[in-house]
Image: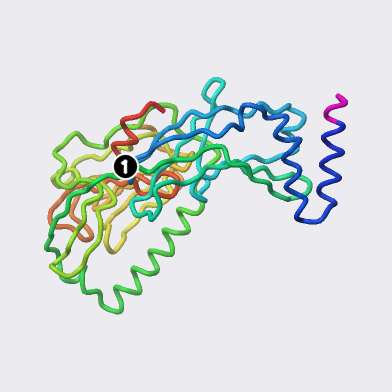
Amino acid sequence: MTLRYINFLALVLFFTSCAHHKEIDIFDPLHAYFGEGFELQHSKVDRGHMERVLINRPNLDPELAALFTKKIFCNEQEVGFKRKGDKLALYLSAPYHYDEDVFSCYYQFTLNDQKRSYSYPFMQVLIRPYEFESERLNVDRRHVELSDEDLQRWESERDELERVYSELEVHRSYFTEPFKRPLNSVITSTYGRERVFNDNVSSWHNGIDFRAWYDTPIPASNRGRVVFAGDLFFNGLTVIIDHGLGIVTLYCHLNEIKVEVGDIVPKGKIIGLSGNTGRTTAPHLHWGVKVAGNWINGFSLTDIEM
């Protein structure tokens, strides 16, 4: 064991035994070990889009690395990352609704034996403005003016989906290839459109709609694990796939589901047939993509190298 390593352990013991306001001082020896990896970087991402950002990988001695659990957070949301040569590939996204024009990313190191965490910022991300279209739609009145029974159903489904999204894989990847569009058909509604249903309900479109007549085979955009397969009030028959690293794809308004929760599906696997279930105006496929907790324009996922 090197003298420098012994000195570091002594500092750990000293600072973790001190009052809480001194615990942050442990970053002084940490910073000496990480060196260039902690220099503040800058990046940009469009509102409602995602980016894969390459960042410097911290150069931590293996003996020291064993003392810590490392996570990365951007805009207070844990994000996935994987090694890419001597870099880390980070998968981050900008929210559709956000009051600020910049957010920060930081490492969080937790001492495995002490269960105490220390954070260190390493990047600032500028959110670039992005304009979206608007549209007016007429749908079944039942899906706009909800009865007490339908409202109760929607609230139950919302809670179930929140649970599903809270249990997604962030620290592993199911995929090894780039993502692809589920269909090459006409786009009938783009991501981010401001929507008015039946002249009195406003929302925004958090996915992309593809033209698809009844029973068109729908393939998975990439390899992943099925985390939801069922019927939802607004989305109809729906499949949700967890691809790891905080990346999710969603397939809605299906006429038939061909997979089950827990299935590991390869890229291109037919997960269902298109339909007209849920709140729709005609048969089509609604394809949603969620990255780092934000619904984003899915084409910003398919357009990048993974």
Amino acid type assigned to the residue bearing label 1 in the image: Ile
Where does the image place residue 254, in percent across and percent down from the top left? 24, 50
Asked whether, in this view, residue 99 is left or right of residue 163, the answer is left
Compare residues 306 and 167 and report the one nearer the observer.
306
Query: Which residue corresponds to mark 1?
Result: 271
Residue in view at x 40 percent, y 68 percent: 156
Compared across the picture, whether 125 is left or right of 24 comes to left
Question: Where's residue 126, x and y in %?
Answer: 41, 41
Main secondary-structure element of the magenta-colored stretch: helix
View extreme (bottom): residue: 148
Point out the stretch of residues depicted in magenta.
Answer: 1-5
Residue depicted at x 78% and y 46%: 113
Q: Is 80 in front, or is 275?
A: 80
Is residue 271 found left or right of 86 in the rendered image?
A: left
Where is residue 187 shown, x and y percent of the image? 16, 41
**Does the segment drawn in magenta span residue 3?**
yes
Coordinates of residue 100 in the picture (x, y in percent): 40, 52
